[in-house]
Image (cartoon, grey):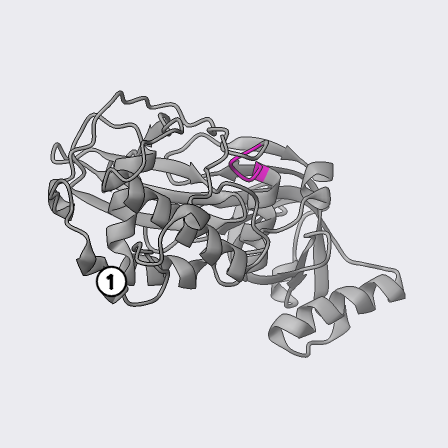
Amino acid sequence: MHLPNRTQSLTPTLYLSPLFGSKPLNKIRFTPLKQNPVCQLSLKCSLSTLSEPTQVGVSNSKPFPAEVSRTIMELSSVGTLSTLTHEGWPLGVGVRFAVDDEGTPVLCLSESQRQFSADKRSSLHVQLEQCGMRTPQCTIQGFLEKPEEKKVLKWLHASWKKRFGEVPEDLIYIIAVDSLHQMEDFMEDGVLVSSSEYKNASPDPLRDFAEAIVNEINTKNLEDVYRFCNVYVDLDFQVSEAKMIWIDRLGFDLRLSCPQNATFDVRIPFPGEVRDEKGAKSSFNGMSQLAWEVEKNYHAPDFPKVKQLKRVKCWGV
């Protein structure tokens, strides 16, 4: 589904909902056909708890698990390294890590941390908190190794130095990736990712400023977030609270709460893939304007709504 571009057909006085900016003064020229305060949005239609992506202008509206894992590893620097002791017990310790161009974890281990058994099987568990609302995770399974080739060691040492500073080269280790286990959040079922999928994937191009964009939208453009629920999502309950969780090259995730204390996540795709901060803001602005037009009955909603939601498991919270 491709969201139509209505901008060129509008008169100069039409209201445009900007990202990170004040509302235009000419908004007061319009008299809304129906007054709906944000907290009283009536969102109607069917509800599903499936979480497969909805097709909106791109072949896949959600990054693949391998891409998500690469993004988690790029944005994180601390994880839990688990290895086997000489007695055969698994032991987990907190470590810092860097990654090379293929996402291989690069570790700096002290003498006391290198007393492992002959079995070099290990795992590195890494979490990324997204705006305090969701914590995607990946667990890399592989073999703890000491790079022997000088050229490779210098290259890995450079990756560590870039992130943390100078250390002796003989402290550098890697985890040779065999497979991964990726989870969207706590209490979620994970998916397996092969080593080749992980190495061939690219981290999300919006990763370095995704959190800043989300925080800005939730602070200054929350009205647009509620409007997106009303226009782009197919619901049969009133939304008592809505916030953006994360944004990436293919779209963004919203978290919705209803008066019955149930919480849902919904994925809203962009009209097309974006590759940088400017593209993300432009897509958000275009979708905001179209949503405003539809809400004010200036245009009929001639696109299918997102019908697939995912109920958030909040056990023990």
SS label for mark 1: helix
Q: Is residue 221 magenta?
A: no
Residue under the image location 66 percent in, 52 percent down? 116
View extreme (bottom): residue: 166
Residue under the image location 68 percent in, 44 percent down? 201
Residue 253 or 1: which is nearer the viewer? 1
Residue 207 seen by the camera? no
x and y, in percent, of residue 35 in the image: 11, 44
What kind of residue is marked 1? Asn
Name which quarter of the figure residue 172 lies in: bottom right
Residue 4 or 54: which is nearer the viewer? 4
Name the residue that disc number 1 marks: 26
Name which quarter of the figure residue 123 lies in: top right
Residue under the image location 72 percent in, 45 percent down? 199
Magenta highlight range:
60-65
x and y, in percent, of residue 211 in the image: 42, 59
Judge left or right: residue 200 versus residue 223.
right
